[in-house]
Image (spheres, rainbow, N blue to C red):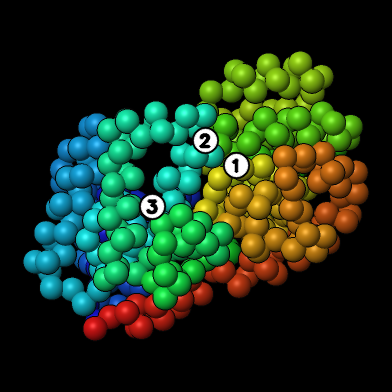
Amino acid sequence: MRAAISIESFRPGPGGVEATAFELARELGRRGVELTVLCREAVAETPPGIRVERLGGPTFWQPLRVLEFSRRSARAARAGGFGLVQAFSRTRHQTVYRAGGGSHAAYMERMYARPQLARLSPRHALLLAIEGAVFADPRQAVQCNSRFAADEIARRHGVPAERLHVVYNGVDLQRFHPSRREAALARVRAELGLEGPIALFAGNGFARKGLDRAIDGLARAGVKADLLVAGSSPAGPYRAQAESLGVGARVHFLGLRADLPELCAAADLFVLPTRYDPFANACLEAMAAGTAVATTLDNGAAELVEPGANGFHCAEDFAPALRALEDPARLRVLGAAARRTAERFGWSAHADAVLELWGRLAP
């Protein structure tokens, strides 16, 4: 089978849809699958065995960029005569549409006080139009990265169950590994002057990821622990929140970090109080590093968390989960169980699931 995947920017990690597409392509290349990557740009060395077709196009103003890539990828797919095309970006025509962002309509309802007004934005209007057309097209299969996302799309858009296929994200089980803990913990403690237990929050877009809930939970938990915050987002309001709650000295804003595997391994607990995440990769990465996870049921990755066994499910109140930092030994037991869970979701297993889906859908 000659197959293609389409992704605006073909590049490796550290996370997100680009990392998923790149790692899948690399794994399929190892297996000798005849795969072409249709992309606007490729900013890394092509994995062995993979053909990359750069389509170019505008890089400015997201609505124009998205619309033009959709057009160019559809044209390239027709010209290539592929047996199957899977889209990782928001494009209109493909065999399989990977709804990695879930439902944009659902995201807007959770994140905007007046979502109907926000729909007037050209960016939102275009994304809603593309996803609406794809979900209404009976010829297209929809790959979801969690049951949470599949159920949301079925309920909101009326997509029948036979078109929805759940394939969980993958993780690099070598890069994120518990064996890093001892050295990573010593380095992090030396860098930041820490002594006690450590909670880690990692994610871009602090408002959606729920950093305010993590800080509030730390203050109300009353534990002698530190919260490390890794990610790109304006930190000012959250610094002020931490100061006002009396935990300013225990919340450390690290910015973007290239050493996330070490931070995950060093932490006693990973917290992600997200308001909407079809599947937060950072949770699976923390689990692979041997760290227990506390997250909300508005995160598809929560489907891999067994409360009290390898982590915690929380609503808005994260104080009970953060109180677990008083018992690091118990968290290490939960972390070991989290690692065993993550071992089922390496990139090889992810590629197996994708190929099985393609085999059922390809003519």
Q: Position of residue 167 (x, y in %)?
A: 48, 69
Among the two numbered marks 2 and 3 on one chain, the one whose residue lies closer to the N terminus:
3
Q: Residue at x 69, y 64 (%)?
A: 339
- On the rendered structure, is 144 left or right of 261? left
Q: Which mark is residue 191?
A: none
Q: Residue at x 61, y 30 (%)?
A: 254
Pointer 2 local density, CA inside 10 Å: few below 14, some 14–19, many at least 20:
few
Q: Quadrant of the C terminus?
A: bottom left
The Cα–Cα distance between marks 1 and 3, rounded to whole angstroms, is 22 Å
Decide if residue 9 is on the left or right side of residue 288.
left
Amino acid bearing label 2: Met
Tell me, yes or no, whether the two marked residues, 1 and 3, touch with CB atoms within 8 Å.
no
- The residue at the point 39 percent across, 71 percent down is 163
Amino acid at pointer 1:
Arg
On screen, residue 362 above or below 212 = below
Q: How many marks?
A: 3
The tag earlier along the polypeptide, 1 or 2, is 2
Q: Quadrant of residue 307?
A: bottom right
**Disc marking residue 18:** 3
198 relative to 96, above or below = above
Q: Mark 3: few, some, or many residues within 10 Å (few <14, many ≥20)? A: some
Residue to which mark 2 is pinned: 111
In this rendered view, identify the residue nearer to me: 326 or 93: 93
